């Protein structure tokens, strides 16, 4: 059921925790998960009493891998359907990125593709030392369109040029070096590390923090609607291209795509 | 001497290697090198067989920046000829930065001045631990403007401020800390470290790679538009023809302190 | 000339401005702001000026804005508040616009507006025991004026964490995130400063002036004038907000502010 995919709770201090709850699918961002996340973020945005929001996940991974069922459906989409689907995902990332209160990603496990977008769209990210990361889209003949504004802002254009083009896996230490994570701790210390940061945030005036967060975004350059629409158009175009179709088909057929010379 | 200043060859996988080939001057660039870079990258961009480009340098160093003797001579040209040199330099770095396929720089030894801009304009940089970098232009009274956009995108405004103002040398580890370099290895290991990176790139769809690189450039606003490039070139050219630059370049050739150095005492 | 900011100019053209309101940990009030602005004008106008050094006397570099001054400014009529805010902003602007390198010598601590002053320097040397913190929100304020300088140093990613948590960071951490450029043992801070200054004197004055201006012009994001006016207005208005009043009152009464009760 859609409402079980993402759980939200808010404690007496105004600390919210939004938890991805589809462990068996490694919290892959399926159509329904995206919808549930969007609903959760919208609900938090409307609350005056929430002072900080933690984004967490159950199971082994934070958000890793592609949702196979959804990818099969997407392979059938028309250009217009692709674009609409992409815009929906872009809207979810935007809702997270613009949440008025400070947000903390509690990255207890690996994150690939869209999962990295979730981390990058949070203000603060604390990761477990064993977590692995990769921006895998090019291996499927696709592009990391919707996450690119957030990922580029988080890790900078230079690291983005490397990891978006190579799709290489990188570890938590590297994730911290490039800026995706702010802190790396042992898995057993993760809860305490997040709790400590929550404690620091609660020392500040909520309205001041909201104003500060907005100001940082406006100064650095917000992710405009025009940009989101442009990224949605680009992913739709590439999904419809021969190479995009070959990449997706190869993935679903569990074989290497033709451009590797082995397909 | 008939040795080409730039060597270029492409292997069966589509990996093109572009090698700076003026080892007798530490691969310092002159007009021929700049024009060679523009022509070669233009050609490689349109060659469907080429999947990615590796840049490296022959001899003991990667690339020591501008050939200062050439610069001294260039400063005596007419303003228009001088400006054209700066336009070419600016466009060479711009073109490399916007090259539509993945680029990997393999850096050993010295990487000075314009060399740091070349590195900042590449997608992936692997350096050996003996590599030394510096943004040297202000030391000689010339301007590094044409490489500032790429350097700022690579290492951030504050690092460019610090290193372009102090002209200090920094090593591979520091370069990696700042984001100019992606991986540091032992001397002689550059190809071994580059191998898996090349394999990873070859695993990506060529069109997807081109669109991904374009996506990041657009999202991060990496392109230097024509008006901005012209402004950088004009400033670069004008500075080179100042008395200050003449003194700076002379001090290099004559291996002495420049006239503006007041001495270390108070 | 006020002795709240000491001025020295040596024969090489090195000007040193030393914050000297040591009884208040070099906090800025209206007089101190005026003194600093006057000293910067004097430095920039000096014949043969080559380098400007900013330092602090006493136990720390600078503790930021004086709380009583903020209270006073917050009670001004809007037009006067804004006019005073312009003078406050002028300090960092003068440093950014100076045609010579500005070097900060940070020992002890740089907090709030004190950290902003350091961030506006071209090169920051820090003693390894120095601490840094962006404390504004803990006092119900927003660090509106310093955000562009902080983004230039820490990127949007660093700003989102350190501005929103208000955490204290060590010099080593400040170096890692870009707030400090050179960190040395406390007892060699002045030697390191002398070495940096000497190195700067070896470089062409015209080249340095043009480089500094060109880097600022090519910085990302560009510092746009309408955004700056909005930040100025937000800073001025923020000083007069209920949160700011509570923050100041709580500090002076040595009690936690209302939002931090029980945290």
Image: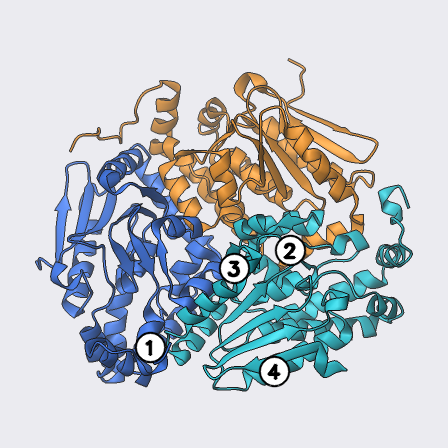
Q: The cyan chain is which one?
A: A
Q: Find numbered disc 3 in the image and state the secondary structure of the residue it sits on.
A: helix
Image: C180 above or below A209:
above
Q: The orange chain is which one?
A: B
Residue at x 79%, y 45% (from the top left corner): B203
Give the residue number, with chain letter if any, for mark 1. C140
Q: Where is residue C211 in the image (x, y as percent from the top left)?
A: 39, 44
**For the residues carrying marks 3 and 1, which lies nearer the camera in this image?**
3
Q: Distance between the residues labelled 3 and 1?
A: 31 Å
Q: Position of residue C205 (x, y in %)?
A: 30, 39
**In this rendering, would A93 be left or right of B64?**
right
Furthest residue toward top: B1
Give the residue number, with chain letter if any, for mark 3. A189
Which of the 4 image quadrants contains residue A86? bottom right
Q: Position of residue B172 (x, y in %)?
A: 51, 34
Q: Which of marks 4 and 3 is nearer the N terminus?
A: 4
Q: Toward the viewer: C3 or A97?
A: A97
Q: How far apart are marks 4 and 3 (CA)?
A: 30 Å
Give the residue number, with chain letter if any, for mark 4. A42
Give the residue number, with chain letter if any, for mark 2. B216
**In this rendering, would C149 be left or right of C73?**
right
Dividing the image into 4 quarters, which one contains the C terminus of chain B?
top left
Q: Where is residue A254 in the image (x, y as percent from the top left)?
A: 89, 54
Other-residue count near label 4 (Cα within 10 Å), few / some / many at <14 / 14–19 / ≥20: some
Q: Toward the viewer: A199 or C150?
A: A199
Q: Find numbered disc 1 in the image and state the secondary structure of the residue it sits on.
A: loop
């Amino acid at each position: 059921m859609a409402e079980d995919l993402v759980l939200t709770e808010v404690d007496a201090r105004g600390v919210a925790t939004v938890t991805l709850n589809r462990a068996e699918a490694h919290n892959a961002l399926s159509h329904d998960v995206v919808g549930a996340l969007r609903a959760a973020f919208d609900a938090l945005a409307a609350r005056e009493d929430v002072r900080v929001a933690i984004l967490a996940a159950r199971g082994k991974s934070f958000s890793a891998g592609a949702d196979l069922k959804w990818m099969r459906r997407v392979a059938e989409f028309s250009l217009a359907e692709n674009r609409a689907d992409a815009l929906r995902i872009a809207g979810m990332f935007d809702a997270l990125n613009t949440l008025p209160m400070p947000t903390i990603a509690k990255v207890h496990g690996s994150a690939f593709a869209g999962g990295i977008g979730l981390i990058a769209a949070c203000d603060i990210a604390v990761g477990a030392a064993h977590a692995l990361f990769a921006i895998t889209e090019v291996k499927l003949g696709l592009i990391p369109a919707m996450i690119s504004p957030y990922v580029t802002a988080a890790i900078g254009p230079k690291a983005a040029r490397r990891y978006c083009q190579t799709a290489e896996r990188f570890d938590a230490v590297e994730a911290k070096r490039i800026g995706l994570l702010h802190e790396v701790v042992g898995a057993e210390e993760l809860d305490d590390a997040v709790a400590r940061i929550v404690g620091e945030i609660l020392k500040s005036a909520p309205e001041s923090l909201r104003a500060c967060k907005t100001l940082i975004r406006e100064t650095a350059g917000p992710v405009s609607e025009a940009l989101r629409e442009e990224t949605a158009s680009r992913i739709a175009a590439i999904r419809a291209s021969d190479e995009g179709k070959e990449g997706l088909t190869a993935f679903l057929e569990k074989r290497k795509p033709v451009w590797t010379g082995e397909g | 001497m008939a040795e080409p200043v730039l060597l270029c060859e492409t292997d069966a996988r589509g990996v093109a290697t572009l090698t700076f080939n003026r080892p007798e001057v530490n691969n310092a660039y002159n007009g021929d090198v700049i024009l060679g870079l523009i022509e070669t990258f233009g050609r490689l961009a349109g060659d469907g067989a080429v999947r990615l480009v590796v840049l490296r340098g022959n001899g003991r160093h990667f690339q020591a920046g501008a050939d200062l003797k050439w610069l001294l001579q260039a400063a005596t040209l007419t303003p228009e000829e001088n400006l054209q040199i700066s336009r070419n330099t600016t466009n060479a770095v711009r073109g490399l930065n916007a090259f539509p396929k993945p680029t990997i720089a393999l850096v050993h030894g010295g990487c000075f001045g314009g060399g740091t801009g070349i590195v900042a304009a590449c997608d992936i940089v692997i350096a050996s631990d003996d590599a030394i970098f510096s943004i040297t232009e202000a030391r000689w009274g010339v301007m590094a403007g044409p490489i500032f956009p790429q350097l700022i995108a690579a290492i951030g405004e504050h690092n460019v401020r610090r290193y372009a103002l102090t002209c200090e040398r920094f090593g591979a580890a520091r370069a990696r800390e700042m984001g100019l370099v992606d991986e540091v290895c032992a001397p002689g290991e550059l190809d071994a470290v580059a191998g898996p990176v090349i394999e990873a790139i070859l695993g990506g769809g060529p069109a997807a790679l081109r669109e991904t690189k374009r996506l990041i450039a657009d999202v991060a606003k990496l392109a230097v538009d024509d008006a901005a490039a012209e402004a950088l070139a004009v400033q670069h050219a004008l500075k080179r023809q100042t008395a200050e630059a003449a003194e700076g370049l002379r001090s290099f050739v004559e291996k002495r302190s420049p006239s503006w150095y007041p001495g270390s005492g108070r | 000339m006020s002795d709240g900011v000491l001025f020295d100019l040596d024969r090489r053209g090195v000007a040193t401005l030393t914050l000297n309101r040591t009884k208040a940990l070099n906090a800025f009030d209206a007089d101190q702001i005026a003194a600093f602005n006057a000293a910067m004008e004097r430095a920039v106008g000096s014949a043969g000026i080559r380098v400007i050094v900013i330092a602090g006397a006493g136990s720390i570099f600078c503790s930021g804005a004086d709380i009583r001054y903020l209270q006073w400014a917050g009670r001004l009529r809007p037009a006067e508040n804004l006019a005073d805010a312009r003078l406050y902003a002028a300090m960092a602007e003068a440093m950014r616009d100076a045609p010579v390198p500005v070097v900060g010598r940070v020992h002890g601590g740089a907090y709030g507006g004190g950290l902003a002053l350091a961030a506006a320097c071209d090169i920051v040397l820090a003693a390894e025991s120095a601490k840094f913190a962006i404390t504004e929100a803990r006092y119900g304020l927003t660090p509106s004026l310093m955000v562009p300088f902080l983004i230039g140093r820490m990127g949007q990613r660093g700003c989102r964490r350190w501005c929103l948590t208000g955490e204290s960071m060590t010099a080593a951490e400040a170096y890692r995130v870009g707030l400090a450029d050179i960190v040395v043992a406390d007892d060699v801070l002045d030697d390191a400063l002398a070495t940096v200054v000497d190195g700067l004197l070896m470089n062409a004055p015209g080249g340095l002036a043009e480089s500094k201006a060109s880097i600022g012009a090519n910085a990302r994001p560009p510092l746009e004038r309408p955004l700056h006016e909005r930040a100025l207005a937000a800073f001025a208005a923020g000083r007069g907000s209920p949160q700011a009043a509570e923050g100041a009152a709580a500090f002076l009464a040595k009690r936690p502010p209302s939002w931090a009760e029980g945290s």
